[in-house]
Image (cartoon, helix red, strand yellow):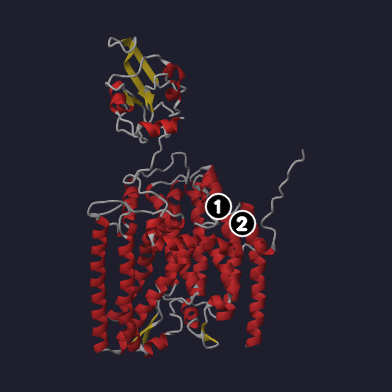
Amino acid sequence: MSITTKVVERKGTSFLEKIFLFEIFKGMCVTFGHFWTNLLDNSKLYVRHYPEVNPEITPRWRGRHRLTTHEDGTIKCVACFMCQTNCPARCITIEAGERFDGKSEKVPVSFNIDLLECIYCGYCVEACPMDAIRMDTGIFSVTTYDRESVFAGIDDLLASKGAFDEEEYKKGSV
Amino acid sequence: MSQLDILLILLRVAFGAFVPLCFIAVLVWLERRGAAFFQDRAGPNRCNVFGFRAGGIVQNLADAVKLIFKEDVIPGHSQHKFYFVLAPLIVFVCALVSFAVVPFADTLVIDGKGYVMQGIPMSLGILWFLAIAGFSVYGIILAGWSSHNKFGVLGGLRASAQVISYEIPMGLAIVSLLTVYGTINLNEIAHFQGQLLFGFIPMWGVVLQPLGALIFIVAAFAETNRTPFDLAEGESELVAGFHVEYSSMKFALFFMGEYVAMFVSSALIVTLFFGGYQIPWLSTETLLANANAVTIGLIIFIPLASAIFTAWMRKNNRSHYNRPKDPRVREANVYTVILWMMVALIEAVLIGYMLNTTGVADRVLVVLLQIVTFLVKTFMMCFVYVWVRWTLPRFRYDQLQKLGWKMLLPLALLNIFITSAVVVALS
């Protein structure tokens, strides 16, 4: 099998290119074109007006975590520690307790995620056998005024809702 | 000295001192907005006073407040605290003082007495600029050396090597220019450019000396330490170069000095090569002879220009997302009202002037027109500075020296020979 070679054309050897001026003029025409269109009509700028206009987030995007529930509102998590074991950043801390409603044997008493430690890799979501933890809240900005409120407890995680409907999420997570 | 003399001296000195200072704000804004538009961004659009953003100029106020209230650090390890404090002063003052010889209007003649419209009415002209511009590099070297920081020293060294290399082609470009003009007085140079070549081309320096103009502009970019020649502060390799140890208002002085230098060298490029205060095809004499026609032209032109500006502003000054009772539309409404009130005032003054015209008023009108022309030209040259900054990448150090010594220097010498030959042949 012969190797296919591609000859790359060397730029900058012709006389016109060597005296810079013509090429500089061409480059300046390009930038001025941008300037002029933006000056005449600034509605087509690429940059988003961020705090007012949020980016569109797809279902596959990994945002802040949440804990999902069964249809009757009870927690899906069975405290199997798969996510905690799998977490490369070691930001998940689970405390297990006994479960009495018959859904399973164990239930997390506390489920803490240190959002400052978390690297948003999504391994916890992949590890979970119960589809109990998801990162589909669409919250990408985790900023607070104090350190305490970045530790997401079980109540926070249960309270946050998914930003996408079930069908879209399933399509994205395959 | 009569009262008129004193008044005119005050006016000229005030113009020479305050216009560069006001232009700092305009240029910082131009740099930000220009950079944004060149890169398809929006630029400063949040900072406001009661919802009025003045197109982003209010951002400068925030900058000023920040810089004034920052801690002013003098590094403890520095052995030369006096020079450390002196350096930004040299940079800023040199930049400011070199504007003093640039004429911003033709000589104003009142009662047979001429008033040269320069900050300092002297005939040294271009020599003064060369002397002062050469001096301002001492500030940079001193800053780099006295802050006792290797990045600072490297930045200072680079700046000095660069300025020395580029001062030679610049001086030689000026030599060929002086051969053409036959004078070093900037006012006479600007006056010379009011003539017409072959009867229809304005006899600007750039037409007579295209090569000289090119060399001078490139060297002027290097003298002001602007991209593509800003190796002295190359962020990627020298952190901030010579001003790395400076904070607060000392840093602000360097920053403002850079913009003043940019304004002054733009003003000088305009004076030497783009006709100075001359309006193309309308020399001072023509303007004075047809003062009434010029006034009628202005009376028609000002509302037209304002109408176009208003339409542009109302189109662009609105929020591009859903916003109840868009405050930017309200802002634009207020600006429109203010603008048209000013237009009405100017129109009233112009019509009043038309009705009872005198000789002195004609001259003052011409001077005002020329000042506006000069400032517009300088602003456009400053825009070229910004434009080049956001188009060209920085030169490597050896490329910079090669360009200075191997290309610009021989070209400048060649230009002198050609120019002298042509001048001798024609005389």
B183 on left or right of B279: right
Q: Quadrant where the C terminus of chain B lies?
A: bottom right
Q: Give, as a three-letter code, the residue at label 1.
A: Leu
Q: Position of residue B220 (x, y in %)?
A: 53, 64
Is disc 1 surrounded by few (<14), some (14 to 19) or many (20+) residues within 10 Å?
Answer: many
Is disc 2 surrounded by few (<14), some (14 to 19) or many (20+) residues within 10 Å?
Answer: some
The residue most toward the bottom is: B289
Q: Which disc number belongs to residue B400?
A: 2
* Above or below for A171 versus B228: above
* Above or below for B271 versus B38: below
Front residue of B304 and B255? B304
Front residue of B427 and B58? B58
Residue shown at 51% from the left, 74% from the top: B272
Which of the marked residues, 2 or 1, is nearer the chain's N terminus?
1
Residue shown at 58% from the left, 69% from the top: B214
Q: Which residue is mark 1?
A: B231
**Can residue B408 be seen by looking at this rendering?**
yes
Label 1's element?
Answer: helix
* Above or below for B305 versus A83: below
Label 2's element?
Answer: helix
